Structure formats: C-alpha cells, structure tokens
C-alpha cells in the first residue's frame, strides 16, 4: 500500500483568509483525488488530477498536481464557513484508493 | 437515482458479539468497495468486489472479517467476535466498474460501529 501524507493535520482560520493543504507521497500515482467529508457523511469527490503539472480550479478552490505526480496541493481563496470539513487526498492504486489521514479545516465566521 | 445507502447508521455492540453491516450500491454499479475509517484517520481499504466476486480481499484485517455480495447488488460485511479495536466508521463505495481505474467512487454515509 502506498502511503500519502497530508499536512497540516488541523487548520483553523478566519473567514476571508486563504489556506493551503498539502498531500505528499514517495510513490507515483496515475491520478490523485481530493475529497471533502463532513461529519456523519461519506467523502464527496471534489476533483481528480491526472497529468503532472496539472492545475484545476473549482470556484474558490485550486488544485495542483506535482510534475512528478507524487504530490498535490489544495488552495482555498477567501475561505467561508461552508468550507469547513475534513479534506482527504487519495491516490489511485489500481482499482482501490489509498487515502491520506486528512486535514481538518475549520473556518470561523 | 439514489446514492449509496448503508445500514444501520449506528451500531453499538458488546465485545465478542457478531455484527453485520449492509451496503446498497448505486444501481448499475458493478464495482463495490469497503473501507474502514478510525477516529482521526484516513480511510483504509478492506475489500473490493467486481460483480459478486472479490478479487481483492487484501485489506481485511483478520479472519474475523468477511464480506459477500449478492449479484451486482447488496453487500454485507460481517465482523465475528468483535473487539474494541474494531470500533470505527465502515464506509462502502460503488463505481461503474467498467474502466478499471480513474473511476469515481461514490461513498455511502457509513456505519458507525462502537464495540464496548
């Protein structure tokens, strides 16, 4: 099983601030996915990045996949309380997913 | 068009008892996955079904854990002689199962298991 490390583990910011979450691995993945999980719910897919160097934007969220396809970042601009949740990265390990431990993001109003 | 459903949503049991957790995948999804999420941790892969066969059971932590799937429908994860370390959220996901990789997995809300 390939290991994904996420940092930071916890992040608490004020509404309107920016934040970045990192996901790093020593192994190459064919694709990497970012999920958000809210309490009592399963993870919901935000984005899949496939190509090294790829950048994808989803409204105020920007996702980057490293050139070597071993690392990724999620940047949120002007965070809102609705962005609060557990952010998980997952590497595509054939048919199954290998998950990082997650970053708990809290956005204070 | 319902999503993945799981039951029960919460289960409290005593150490040593057996439990069954159920997953109803999205209709038409041939691939089904079970994951476990311990408190404060990411998801651990348990088992993968393609149709009713399980080509990968490598994530099952011990022989107390087993799973089966009826056709391309419901799956049941059974934990025998539960231990306190089995306490976790058990999540089920399904996907189309046609493209082997880079398929979107849709997750259910999970079953929260507490073993006293």
Image (cartoon, helix red, strand yellow):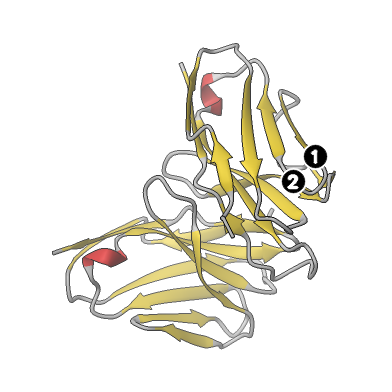
Label 1, on which residue? Answer: B70
Determine the residue located farthest toward the front in the rendered image.
Answer: B1
Residue B112 visible (yes or no): yes
Please give left or right for residue A2 compared with residue B52 in the image.
Answer: left
Identify which residue, A29 or B21, lies in the foreground: B21
Please give left or right for residue A10 compared with residue B2 in the image.
Answer: left
Q: Residue at x 64, y 15 (%)?
A: B81
Q: Is residue A16 above or below residue B50?
A: below
Residue A2 visible (yes or no): no
Residue A91: name its quadrant.
bottom right
Q: Residue at x 77, y 62 (%)?
A: B97
How far across and how far down the image is residue B18, in percent?
A: 63, 17
Determine the residue located farthest toward the left in the rendered image.
Answer: A109
- Crowding around mark 1 (Cα neighbors within 10 Å: few <14, some 14 to 19, many 20+) is few
Identify which residue, A70 or B115, lies in the foreground: B115
Same-chain check, marks 1 and 2 = yes
Q: Is residue B75 above or below residue A79?
A: above
Identify which residue, A26 or A61, lies in the foreground: A61
Q: Residue at x 59, y 60 (%)?
A: B1
**Contact, CB < 8 Å: mark 1 with mark 2?**
yes
- Label 1 marks a residue whose chain is B
Q: Secondary structure at mark 1?
A: loop
- Which numbered marker is on residue A8? none
- Which numbered marker is on residue B73? 2
């Amino acid at each position: 099983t390939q290991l994904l490390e996420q940092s930071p583990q916890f992040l608490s910011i004020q509404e309107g601030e920016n934040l970045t979450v990192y996901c790093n691995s020593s192994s190459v993945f064919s694709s990497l996915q970012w999920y958000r999980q809210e309490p009592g719910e399963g993870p919901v897919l935000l984005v899949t990045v496939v190509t090294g160097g790829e950048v994808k934007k989803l409204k105020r969220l920007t996702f980057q996949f490293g050139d070597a396809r071993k690392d990724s970042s999620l940047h949120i601009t002007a965070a809102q309380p609705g962005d609060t949740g557990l952010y998980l990265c997952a590497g595509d390990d054939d048919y199954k997913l290998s998950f990082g431990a997650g970053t708990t993001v809290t956005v204070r109003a | 068009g319902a999503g993945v459903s799981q039951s029960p949503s919460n289960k409290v049991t005593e150490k040593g008892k057996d439990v069954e957790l159920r997953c109803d995948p999205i209709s038409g999804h041939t691939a089904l996955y079970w994951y476990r999420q311990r408190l404060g941790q990411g998801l651990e892969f348990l088992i993968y079904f393609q149709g009713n066969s399980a080509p990968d059971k490598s994530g099952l932590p011990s022989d107390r854990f087993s799973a089966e799937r009826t056709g391309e429908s419901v799956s049941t994860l059974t934990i025998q002689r539960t231990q306190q370390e089995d306490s976790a959220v058990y999540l089920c996901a399904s996907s189309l199962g046609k493209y082997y990789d880079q398929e979107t997995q849709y997750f259910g809300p999970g079953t929260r298991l507490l073993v006293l």
